[in-house]
Image: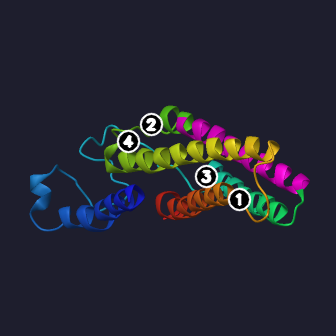
Amino acid sequence: MFFAAFFGALFYARVLSVPALSTGDNEALLWQGFTNAWPSAGPRPEDTFTPMGAWGIPALNTLLLLTSGATLTWAHHGLLHGNRGALKTGLLLTILLGVVFLGFQMYEYFHAWNDLNLRLDSGIYGSTFYLLTGFHGLHVTIGAIMLTVMLFRVMAGHFRPDHHFAFEATAWYWHFVDVVWLILFVVVYWL
């Protein structure tokens, strides 16, 4: 529901609010030179910023998360077929890919803040950018912690092919995080 609300806020600002504010007499109510453009710099055009592009780190992060979904599926397949090596290796690779994703996201934030002048107060674009990507990063962190707990449980022998709901629920969560990132990548970075 949080992601639905955050994507709804982005949709409202981008598709409804900014275009509506640029029509008729609304410009006089806002500031001189307001135009229907996304991303909107807001009322302080002197604080210009460069939006984060889709290619580069965001595309690499997309590849990392898609790969992590495949390694987790491989681990699950190993669990179902009694292949403990594939289970442990796939789970460890998934955790590592999640941690690398988070490292690249931290670098992306540093780059956006220092080099692109993209900040939380950079109008509605900056706010929604950091809100959506940061909230997603929090979910990746939680997912990596959950997967680490599953790895410890796998090492302790807690799961069998017919008894592994905790593992499966964690895998569902991780795949949800993957799907949300794909939507986020398209809506925030690409469009």
Q: Earlier in the sequence, mark 3 or mark 2?
A: 3
Mark sitting on residue 48: 4
Residue occupying the point 69% across, 52% down = 60
Where in the figure is residue 166, as x and y percent of width and height?
A: 64, 55
Name the front one of labels 2 and 4.
Answer: 2
- The secondary structure type at the circle numbered 3 is helix
Where in the figure is residue 176, as x and y percent of width and height?
A: 56, 61
Between 169 and 135, the one nearer to me in the picture: 169
Tag 3 and tag 1, C-beta contact below 8 Å = no
Tag 4 and tag 3, C-beta contact below 8 Å = no
- The secondary structure type at the circle numbered 2 is loop
Q: Earlier in the sequence, mark 1 or mark 2?
A: 2
Q: Is residue 53 above or below residue 16?
A: above
Which residue position holds label 3? 58
The kind of residue on which mark 1 rests is His
**Circle 3: is it few (<14), some (14-19), or many (20+) Cα within 10 Å?**
many
The kind of residue on which mark 4 rests is Thr
Tag 2 and tag 4, C-beta contact below 8 Å = yes
Which residue position holds label 1? 164
Numbered marks: total: 4
Name the front one of labels 4 and 1.
Answer: 1
In space, the residues marked 2 and 4 are separated at their CA atoms by 7 Å
Q: Earlier in the sequence, mark 4 or mark 3?
A: 4
Is 9 one of the magenta-colored residues? no
- The secondary structure type at the circle numbered 1 is loop
Magenta span: chief secondary structure:
helix
Span shown in magenta = 84-109
Mark sitting on residue 117: 2
Q: Quadrant of residue 54?
A: bottom right
